[in-house]
Image (spheres, helix red, strand yellow):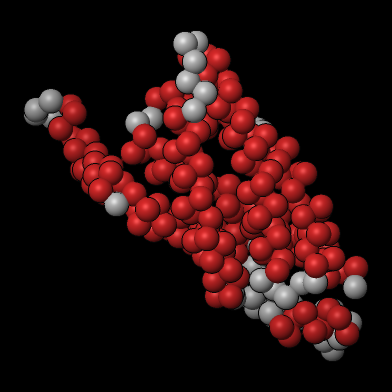
Amino acid sequence: TIPGPSWVWLEPIATPFRAYGRAQQRRPYVTQLLSSLAIYFFGDLSAQRISPSPTTSETTKRATGENNEDGDEQIPERKWDPARTGRALLIGGISSIPSYRWFLWLGNSFNYSSKLLSLSTKVFVNQVGFTPIFNCYFFAMQSALTGATPAEIVKRVKDTVPVSWVNSCKIWPAVTAFSFTFVPFQYRSIFAGVIAIGWQTYLSLLNQRAAAMEESEH
């Protein structure tokens, strides 16, 4: 039998969350920025493990059709792409404070006498207003930071935003509703951040697939 109250054994887990909550209350912008950078960093690492960026030599061989002696296309080992991670960090850093301000405003708005109406309105406004704008920003920046032309940026947005918005409807309304209902304000960022690591992985993969399709069309 384990001595003492059962909740005592949760203390090592609860302590970091309390520290995060205090930091969020004292320095919300700094905490939000660092949290966003961590989310985008781990999301990009996860995406690169699933779908690494092709090396320059691999891209060249694909373009020229160069094969090895057995007639098979050579596929060099693909490694971590720091430039790709840098783009993700820049995109996440720029959007961190506006995203924080948006959810702060959303939490203070649409507070009706009916809790169900308030929650439904917040979820709807977030999904219809914030999500498509953020997705346009994410994919446009990903394309622009690789030196794409305006026409290529527009094509990237058209190829990725509709499908990403549809898929976001499968997860983010539930996350948003749960967050506004059960999670205290100072912990909402870290709660959403855990989900966002997986979501950023998906967005990065979707962006890489769109980039590969565009490259194959040239």
Q: Is residue 16 visible?
A: no
Q: Position of residue 1 (x, y in %)?
A: 13, 26
Instruction: Determine the residue positioned at 49% across, 28% down.
Output: 109
Instruction: Determine the residue positioned at 50% across, 33% down.
Output: 106
Q: Position of residue 50 (x, y in %)?
A: 62, 59
- Residue farthest along the top direction in this orientation: 114
Quarter containing the C terminus:
bottom right
Q: Is residue 122 above or below residue 37?
A: above
Q: Is residue 160 visible?
A: yes
Q: Please indicate whether residue 150 sits to the left or right of residue 139 in the image.
A: right
Q: Position of residue 48 (x, y in %)?
A: 60, 64
Quadrant in which residue 6 is drawn: top left
- Exactly how many numbered labels are in the figure? 0
Name the foreground residue: 213 vs 109: 109
Quadrant in which residue 33 is drawn: bottom left
Q: Is residue 146 above or below residue 113?
A: below
Name the foreground residue: 119 vs 41: 119
Q: Position of residue 176 (x, y in %)?
A: 52, 31
Instruction: Determine the residue positioned at 73% across, 85% down.
Output: 57
